[in-house]
């Protein structure tokens, strides 16, 4: 079994339940975590000149983004988002807006 196949088998076992936890029963309610889980991996090798094994390698990564949780109780089911997510989403937008504003101000001065 090559290294890529071995890594793929282990990585595919990681999901939302393994990344952020199983659903939890809370006094009269239930909390179900929601996350985005993505995997990337690859490998390669150099066959050399035919009589000597060449170099090779493999690597991979797993990305887990906790989005929020579904909360169910006597009043129904609702989604509660992760407040930290807004900072991750808003930061690039604020940066891009600031850069665009600076470009407009420089252009207006000319």
Image (tube, helix red, strand yellow):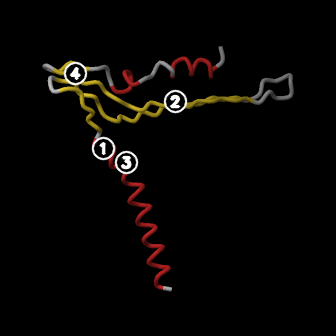
Q: Report the front residue among 2 and 11.
A: 11
User: Do the CB atoms of the residues marked 3 and 1 lie less than 8 Å apart?
Assistant: yes
Q: CA distance from mark 1 to mark 2?
A: 22 Å
Q: Nearer the viewer, mark 1 or mark 4?
A: 4
Return the residue at label 4: 30
Query: Which quadrant of the figure has residue 99?
Result: bottom left
Question: Which residue is at 35% across, 36% downward?
Answer: 67
Return the residue at label 1: 84
The crowd level at tag 4 (other Cα within 10 Å; few <14, some 14-19, many 20+) is some
Q: Earlier in the sequence, mark 1 or mark 4?
A: 4
Return the residue at label 2: 39
Query: Which quadrant of the figure has residue 96?
Result: bottom left
Q: Earlier in the sequence, mark 4 or mark 2?
A: 4
Q: CA distance from mark 4 to mark 2?
A: 28 Å
Q: Position of residue 69 (x, y in %)?
A: 29, 30
Dot 3: element = helix
User: Do the CB atoms of the residues marked 4 and 2 lie less than 8 Å apart?
Assistant: no
Q: Position of residue 33 (x, y in %)?
A: 31, 27
Question: Which residue is at 30% across, 44% downward?
Answer: 84
Dot 1: element = helix
């Amino acid at each position: 079994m090559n290294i890529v196949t071995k890594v793929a088998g282990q990585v595919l076992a990681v999901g939302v339940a393994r990344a952020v936890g199983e659903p939890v029963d809370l006094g009269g309610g239930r909390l179900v975590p929601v996350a985005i889980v993505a995997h990337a991996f690859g490998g390669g090798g150099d066959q050399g000149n035919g009589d000597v094994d060449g170099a090779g390698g493999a690597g991979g990564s797993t990305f887990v983004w906790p989005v929020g949780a579904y909360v169910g109780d006597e009043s129904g089911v609702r989604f509660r988002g992760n407040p930290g997510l807004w900072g991750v989403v808003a930061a690039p937008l604020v940066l891009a807006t600031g850069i665009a504003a600076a470009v407009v101000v420089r252009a207006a001065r000319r």
